Amino acid sequence: MKIFSFWRSLATYRVRIALSLKGITPEEVIEVNLMKGHQRDPKFKAVNPMMAIPALIDGEGPALFESLAIIEYLDETHPRPPLLPTDPKARARVRGLAQIIACDSHPLVVPRVREYLAHEYKIDEAGVMKWAGHWVATALGALEEHLSHGKETGTYCQGDQITIADICLASQAAGAHFFKVDINQYPTVKRIVETCMKNEAFAKAHPLKQPGAPAAA
Ligand SMILES: N[C@@H](CCC(=O)N[C@@H](CS)C(=O)NCC(=O)O)C(=O)O
C-alpha cells in the first residue's frame, strides 16, 4: 500500500488514523508538499486530478481518492475494528457528523481556497485566517449542538465505539489549532477529542508528529 501524504494535511490525517486503528502500515509514504504546490505537479495530477491528498494505492491500484471513501474502503477490506456502527440510523448519524467536517467545513479552508482568496481577491493573511476560522468554528458549533444534545453520544461521538465521526472530529480539532479557533468553546467536542488523543492510533497520526512538521504550528 502507498499513501500520498503531507504532515499538515487534515484529510490525510483522517486516513492515517484509520490505517493506524486497523494496524496497517503502508509500505510507502510519498510526500506531496502542499506548501510548495507539489499537488499541482503533472505527475501527481495523474494520480488525483483534483490535485489533493490523500490518495492511496492498494496493490495494482487504481489510486483511491477522497478521505471518507478511502476510510470506508479500509473498513470494508479490514473489518476489525469496525469504524461504522451496524444500526442504520447510527450509521447515518456517524456519516452525517463526519460529513459536516469533511464536506461542509474542511473544503472551505484547504490551500486552493485560501490561495484563491489571497491571489484573486487580494485578501491579506489575517483576512484569510479569519475566513478559515469562521468556517471551522461554524462546524464546531453545529457539532457541539449535535454531540451535547444527542442521547447517542457516549465516550465517543456514537456511543462507546470509535467511528469515522471521531476520526473526522480529531482532524477538525487539529484544524481549529491551525486556524486559531479556541476548542474550549466546545466542551463536548473537546472531551471526545481528548479521549481520542489518548489512543496511540490518533496520537501518532497527528499532523505535528509527521516527518517535516515544525515543533509547533
Ligand atoms: N474532500 C477531500 C479533501 C482533500 C483536500 O482538499 N486535501 C487538501 C489537504 S488537507 C489538499 O490536498 N489540498 C490541496 C490544495 O488545496 O491545493 C478529502 O476529504 O480527501
Image (spheres, rainbow, N blue to C red):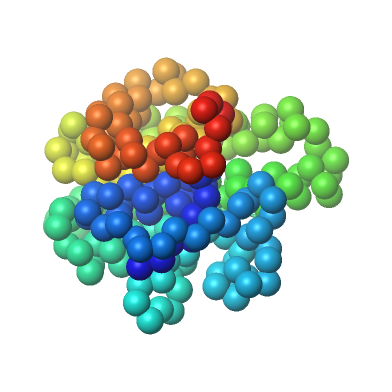
Residue 1 vs 144, above or below: the answer is below
- Residue ranking furthest to the bottom: 60
Q: Nearer the viewer, residue 170 or 140?
A: 170
* Ligand 1 - quadrant of the structure image: bottom right
Residue 195 point in image, percent of width and height: 25, 29
- Residue 183 is situated, as x and y percent measured from the top left of the image, at 44, 23
Towards the viewer: 62 or 150: 62
Which quadrant, please, contains the N terminus?
A: bottom left
How many numbered badges does the structure rendering display?
0
* Drawn side of residue 176 relative to residue 80, left or right: right
Taking depth in this image into account, of 185 and 74 the one nearest to the observer is 74
**119 in relation to 128, above or below:** below
**If the image is split into quadrants, where does the C terminus sit?**
top right
Q: Position of residue 179 (x, y in %)?
A: 58, 30
**Residue at the (69%, 55%) spot, across then down:** 37
Q: Residue furthest top?
A: 184
Residue 61 visible at all: yes
Horizontal side of 65 relative to 22 (left or right) equals: right
Residue 182 is left or right of residue 59, and the answer is: right
Residue drawn at point x = 25 percent, y = 37 percent:
200
Q: Is residue 95 above or below residue 147?
A: below
Identify the residue shown where x is 55% and y is 32%: 214
Q: Is residue 89 visible?
A: no
- Corner quadrant of residue 159: top left
Q: Position of residue 99 (x, y in %)?
A: 41, 51
Residue sitting at x 20%, y 64%: 78
Left or right of 202: which side holds 35?
right
